[in-house]
Image: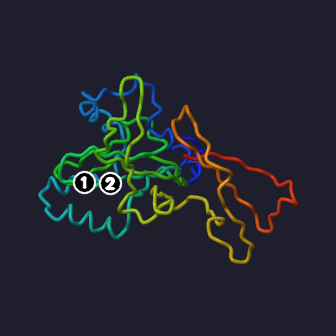
Amino acid sequence: MSERPMRWSPRLALAGLVGCALLAPPAAWPQATSFDSLLEGSWRRSPVSPRIEELIRSARGGDRDAVPRFWTALSAGGAPLIEPDGADTLSALVTFVWRSAGPVHVGAILDFSQSALRMLLQRAPGTDVWFRTYRVPADARFLYAFAVDDESFPFEFGDSTAWPAAPRVDPLNPKSWGSPPQLSLVELPRAPAMPWRVPDSSRARGAVGRFGTPVRSEILGNERTGFVYRPAGYADSLGPYPLLVFGAS
């Protein structure tokens, strides 16, 4: 791993979610008929949370309280699981979990999971715990959502791919982005501070409003709305003002 880990911000992660795991070349994507058969090999190559490993050992050893104990602790501490990556201080293990007693196709929609195959959660044997562990920089901050038995699954159809039809926030994660919540937020303990997120009551506040009328795109088949932020004291007669433009999904 590089000595200078990448840093993700909510803004960058949100933009990345447009492509998230769906930009892998078609040849790298499994077909629907063989999708499940390819999962185990992928999971064997992935890191596994020490807490999940402990849960599996306890369940296999006949500890009937292991699973209820796991969910109680997770409900109290919040998801996802964040754990040290052994002796590597530059990275950490982040584990996304979902609860389902029956079969389910649930994926963590991320901007670094590379393919649909690598976003699907695995069931911990003998439990109702589904999980997927990723190794990420120890100072990471990023957004995610879940796709649960989504109608677009497995998101790959010949030479085309599809975006999950109904992404969900993580019900066990109290941190979210958007109002109402649209995505869940992960902030590792070493993530850099973002003091500008907290409103400063001592500063004059500007205003955000719609810019013009929605623009129709025949290629995308939809309309896009523009928004503009005007600083405190803004007036057309005082211009020109600097303009910063960025796009988001």
- Work out how far the residue at label 2 is from the one at label 1, CA to CA, in angstroms: 7 Å
The residue that disc 2 covers is: 97
Circle 2 packing at 10 Å, graded few (<14), some (14-19), many (20+), is: many
Q: Residue at x 11, y 58 (%)?
A: 62
Asked whether, in this view, residue 7 is left or right of residue 84, the answer is right
Please name the residue shown 32% across and 35% down the image.
154
Q: Measuring 59% from the left and 40% from the top, which residue is drawn there?
A: 216
**Left or right side of 200 for 161:** left
Residue 59 in the image: above or below residue 200: above
Q: Nearer the viewer, residue 172 or 224?
A: 224
On screen, residue 232 above or below 26: below
Secondary structure type for disc 2 = strand
Left/right placement of residue 151 relative to residue 160 reads: left
- Amino acid marked by disc 2: Val
Instruction: Say which amino acid is labelled 1.
Output: Val
Q: Residues within 10 Å of mark 1 (few under 14, many from 20)?
A: many
Figure check: 61 above or below 33: below
Q: Are marks 2 and 1 in contact (CB under 8 Å)?
A: yes
Q: Position of residue 245 (x, y in %)?
A: 70, 47
Residue 129 is labelled as: 1
